[in-house]
Amino acid sequence: MNENYKKTPAEQRAERRRKQVLDAAEACFLKSGFHVTSMAEISKAASMSVGHIYNYFEGKEMIICALVERQVNEFLALLAQASESEQNFVEALKASLESDYKKGLTIAQVSLIHDVLAEIGRNDKITQAILAYDANVRRFLVEKCTAYKPEWTPLEVTLRMELVLSLLNSCTFRYAVNPDLDISAYKAEIGRTLDLLFER
């Protein structure tokens, strides 16, 4: 979309309504899990009729997909912001990790992430959404890494960005199974591991 394009009042209103639904749905999913949560519960939490919600989302599956998209877009925005402010790609990765976790995670939030990931291979719509969004993140990382490490082969870049994603994503899994984990100390170790990886 043209960066100079200004959304119409109707588009802005629709955007606000979509956010209203997504925020309500996320709260419901965090409380009860998305399998148990009904559209009626989302409707009540959003103070919006079920019929009105269907104007913005085809159903609960698409709400879940939109939540995944929102999370991925937030992560990409953090990476992009860090890349613009940091000359060193490794420092940008560390900065994005710090930004992602500075607000802290709850066990419910971590569990919801893994509930959604568990749908890969079970639910076609959710699977396709997750795969597409993951591909966007990988493309971004590969592009930035290729510019930062031009001496690496395309295969090296691809494989090492997979390692980077594994490291960044590991925080949520480790926190879920070990809530006593010191996230700050763990992030520092990830930072040191990234330094070693990029020295190669």
Image: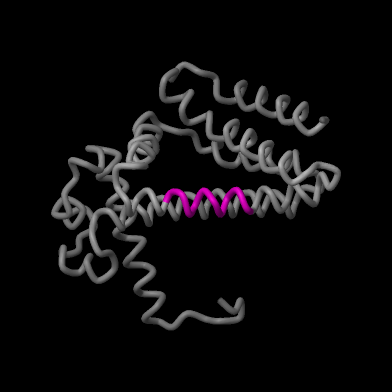
Quarter of the image where the N terminus is located: bottom right
Give the answer, above or below, for where 95 lies relative to 12.
above
Whether the magenta-drawn stretch holds residue 134 is answered as yes
Give the answer, above or below, for where 128 lies relative to 183.
below
Whether the magenta-drawn stretch holds residue 72 is answered as no
Magenta-drawn segment? 130-139
Observer-nearest of 17 and 164: 164
Q: Quarter of the image holding residue 111?
A: top left
Q: Quarter of the image holding residue 77?
A: bottom right
Residue at the spot 61% in from the left edge and 76% down from the top edge: 3
Residue at the spot 51% in from the left edge and 38% down from the top edge: 103
Residue at the spot 19% in from the left edge and 45% down from the top edge: 37
On the image, the x and y values in percent for residue 14 come to 35, 73
Magenta span dominant secondary structure: helix
Give the answer, above or below, for where 62 lies relative to 31.
below
Quarter of the image where the C terminus is located: top right
Q: How is the image coloured?
A: one colour
